């Protein structure tokens, strides 16, 4: 049986994305409803991700649905050697929808092919995390009033950052210009730059955030992780170059907002939190509305 | 007068009707056999390998009696024998010649090069979209990573 699932942001047409974002705005207006009354949602987290899981569970609870699941694979039958195939075939009997996070890439697509109920990919290894991308888009749309003709400045780990790749692919559907700010070792991979060139979209690469910060409508910060560097000396050299401080925001655009997928470590100085341009915690709240919209549209309830 | 040293003449006899697959690289003959499932059928099959070829170095040839392939089936060998040529034989005569073409999707033949892909953990039939035919580049329908010609492995 083929049901509608959300595995990759590319599965959605631009119309479908627009529809979900519109629905998210409706849920923001009216987040407490009984649409999911009598429905059960499974949150299968084969690796821990507290933020994503709580956001999904909050979304379901606010709509009167029930949640069952596990929070990491040590408390599931995986430790007994059960295959993903068997887990999904079993669990899909109990629930109306499955939310799954799994460390193996492609596991979500596989689960969606097996499951008789819709599957939402809440992250499959380094591959896809489409609900993060949708909540990013919602945050951009909400703060800028449009998705067209924006300048997005992506900062930090642009090589391994799953969220920046998905956001780039999604935003390339609109007339977006990009600035990529990253150390040499963590630059945006060529395949994404080629993708933008083929679409005729502008991008500019630099290692200096100050050079491009004042052009930005959105600054998208990511974490530069020590373990990504082959040479620890390199990390020590660059780790402070990609930290956002309050004083750097002085001449930025008035409507500019700072996004971050969280968790933050030290790449945004805490003095920025009090600035009206800091938007990362509101962004996390937007995640609840966006997930309400995604769940209800997959279940055909909206 | 035919050259009696012609290895084709010596080693591989003609068939009455069926399919001759020529210009298979000698190094991939057994992969072709496996992909087409020739090791599991009861038809009469003769093959020759390490034959000299003017164009391909060492080549192999397979003659299968009584089998005529659909395009979809035969195109599956394009990954390992891109220059293969088919002769369709009836009454000892070649009635049609065909070439193979890399299909748009590849199912159950290639292995995903990504060690963290689900297809390398569970019994999942691999499925790729062909994003480039020459050189071959395959995009895994599961992990979405690209497997290129260099890293291509046949299951």
Image (spheres, rainbow, N blue to C red):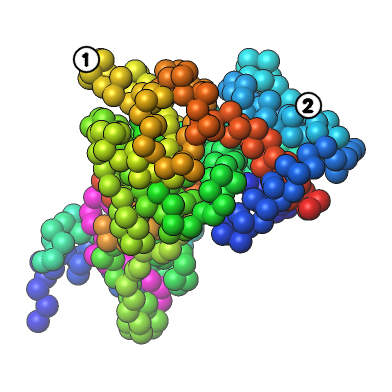
Calculate the distance from the C-alpha at mark 2 to the C-alpha at mark 1: 45 Å
Residue shown at 30%/19% (left/top)?
Answer: A240
Circle 1 is placed at which residue position? A233
Eyeballing the image, is A23 above or below B61? above
Q: Is residue A139 magenta?
A: no
Residue A207: give x, y in percent of width and height.
Answer: 25, 34
Asked whether the viewer can see residue A255, the reply is yes
Task: Locate residue A179 relative to residue B68 in the image: left or right.
Answer: left
Task: Out of A96 and A30, give the one closest to the viewer.
Answer: A30
Task: Locate residue B64 relative to residue A89 in the image: left or right.
Answer: left
Q: Residues within 10 Å of mark 2 (few under 14, many from 20)?
A: some
Check chain identity for marks 2 and 1: say if they share one. yes
First along the sequence among labels 2 and 1: 2
Task: Out of B20 and A104, give the one closest to the viewer.
Answer: A104
Task: Locate residue A171 relative to residue A192 in the image: left or right.
Answer: right
Q: Chain of mark 2?
A: A
Regarding mark 1 in the picture, which secondary structure is present there?
helix
Residue shown at 44%/52% (left/top)?
Answer: A150
Eyeballing the image, is B131 above or below A181? below
Task: Out of B42 and A286, give the one closest to the viewer.
Answer: A286
Pointers 2 and 1 in contact (C-beta within 8 Å)? no
Eyeballing the image, is B26 above or below A215? below
Q: Chain of mark 1?
A: A
Residue B45: give x, y in percent of width and height.
Answer: 38, 61
Q: Nearer the viewer, mark 2 or mark 1?
A: 1
Task: Out of A88 and A18, give the one closest to the viewer.
Answer: A18
Question: Where are the magenta residues, as a range?
Answer: B17-33
Residue A119: give x, y in percent of width and height.
Answer: 68, 42
On residue A68, the disc is: 2
Residue B76: give x, y in percent of width and height.
Answer: 41, 60
């Amino acid at each position: 049986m083929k049901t509608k699932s959300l595995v990759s942001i590319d599965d959605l047409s631009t119309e479908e994305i627009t529809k979900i974002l519109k629905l998210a705005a409706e849920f923001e207006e009216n987040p407490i409803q009984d649409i999911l009354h009598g429905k059960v949602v499974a949150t299968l987290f084969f690796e821990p991700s507290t933020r994503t899981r709580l956001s999904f569970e909050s979304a379901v609870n606010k709509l009167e649905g029930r949640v069952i699941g596990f929070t990491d694979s040590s408390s599931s039958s995986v430790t007994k050697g059960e295959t993903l195939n068997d887990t999904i075939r079993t669990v899909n009997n109990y629930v109306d929808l499955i939310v799954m996070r799994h460390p193996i890439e492609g596991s979500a697509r596989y689960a969606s092919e097996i499951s008789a109920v819709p599957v939402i990919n809440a992250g499959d290894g380094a591959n896809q995390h489409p609900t993060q991308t949708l909540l990013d888009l919602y945050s951009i749309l909400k703060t800028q009033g449009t998705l067209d003709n924006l300048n997005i400045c992506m900062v930090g780990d642009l090589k391994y950052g799953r969220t920046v790749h998905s956001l780039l692919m999604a935003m390339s559907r609109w007339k977006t210009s990009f600035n990529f700010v990253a150390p040499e070792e963590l630059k945006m991979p060529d395949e994404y730059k080629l993708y933008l060139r083929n679409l005729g979209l502008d991008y500019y690469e630099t290692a200096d955030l100050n050079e491009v910060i004042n052009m930005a409508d959105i600054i998208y910060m990511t974490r530069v992780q020590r373990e990504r560097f082959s040479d620890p000396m390199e990390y020590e050299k660059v780790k402070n170059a990609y930290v956002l401080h309050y004083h750097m925001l002085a001449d930025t655009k008035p409507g500019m907002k700072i996004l971050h997928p969280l968790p933050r470590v030290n790449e945004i100085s805490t003095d920025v939190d009090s600035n009206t341009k800091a938007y990362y915690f509101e962004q996390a709240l937007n995640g609840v509305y966006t997930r309400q919209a995604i769940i209800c549209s997959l279940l055909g309830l909206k | 007068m035919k050259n009696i040293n012609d290895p084709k003449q010596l080693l591989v006899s003609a068939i009455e009707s069926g399919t001759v697959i020529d210009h298979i690289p000698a190094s991939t003959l057994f992969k072709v056999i496996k992909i087409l499932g020739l090791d599991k059928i009861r038809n009469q099959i003769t093959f020759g390998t390490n034959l000299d070829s003017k164009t391909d170095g060492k080549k192999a040839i397979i003659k299968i009696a009584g089998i005529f392939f659909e395009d979809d089936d035969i195109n599956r060998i394009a990954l390992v024998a891109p220059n293969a040529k088919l002769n369709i034989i009836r009454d000892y005569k070649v009635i049609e010649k065909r070439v193979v073409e890399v299909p748009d999707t590849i199912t159950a033949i290639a292995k995903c090069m990504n060690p963290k892909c689900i297809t390398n953990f569970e019994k999942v039939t691999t499925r790729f979209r062909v994003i480039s035919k020459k050189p071959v580049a395959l995009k895994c329908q599961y992990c979405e990573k690209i497997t290129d010609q260099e890293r291509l492995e046949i299951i």
